[in-house]
Amino acid sequence: MTDSFDRTSFEVINRVRYFEDFAVDQVYHHHWGRTLTAADNVNFSTSMCCWLPMYLNVPYAQEHGHPDTVIHPMLVLCTVVGLSAQDLSEGGGAFLGLEDCTFHRPLYPGDTVAGQSTVIAARPSRSRPGGVVSWHTEARQQDGELVVDFVRTNLVAARPAA
């Protein structure tokens, strides 16, 4: 089988942002979002050895007032952090932590989550080239309801010398 694609015709888009690219109050709207499925939920929950019936058993979840199984909240959080990586941390750098995380409402199979992040702090590092940047991220489901919000902090590299 021959490869009919001319890879040289594809433009490489560098989305890496450096410390100098971040300023307090900048807002980044992360791309189109991600629909979470029942399969995603089962795979995540069982791979984490989380056998809670709320995430795996429809009748159990319905008996507790939910229309379907609840999407594991850590899957939601991991998905939102992943959606934000292209805009905030694609260039690498140490992940320094996540704090003030609040889950506001559950998601169910078929719900789509999308997010945006606002730069809330940016300071030069005292020990490394670049700096420490913190973002407040909010994720909403397809109807605009807030699902989760948190503050994430990364060490971000300085722009390379020309």
Image (cartoon, rainbow, N blue to C red):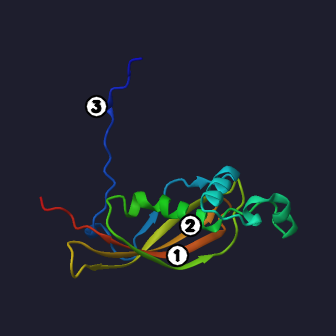
Residue 23 in the image: above or below residue 57: below
Where residue 56 sits: x, y (%)? Answer: 74, 59
Instruction: Looking at the picture, tell me which residue is in the foreground, 140 or 81.
Output: 81
Q: CA distance from mark 1 to mark 3?
A: 40 Å
Q: Amino acid at mark 1?
A: Phe
Q: Amino acid at mark 2?
A: Leu
Pointer 2 local density, CA inside 10 Å: few below 14, some 14–19, many at least 20: some
Q: Amino acid at mark 3?
A: Thr
Residue 125 in the image: above or below residue 63: below
Residue in view at x 76 percent, y 66 percent: 54
Where residue 133 sits: x, y (%)? Answer: 35, 75
Secondary structure of the residue carrying numbered label 3: helix
Instruction: Looking at the picture, tell me which residue is in the foreground, 69 or 102.
Output: 69
Number of marks drawn: 3
Pointer 3 local density, CA inside 10 Å: few below 14, some 14–19, many at least 20: few
Q: Are marks 3 and 2 in contact (CB under 8 Å)?
A: no
Name the residue that disc number 3 marks.
Answer: 8
Residue 159: image tag: none
For residue 84, side relative to residue 18 (left or right): right
Q: Are marks 1 and 2 in contact (CB under 8 Å)?
A: yes
Q: CA distance from mark 3 to mark 2?
A: 37 Å
Name the residue that disc number 2 marks.
Answer: 77
Where residue 126 sits: x, y (%)? Answer: 22, 82
Residue 150: image tag: 1
Secondary structure of the residue carrying numbered label 1: strand
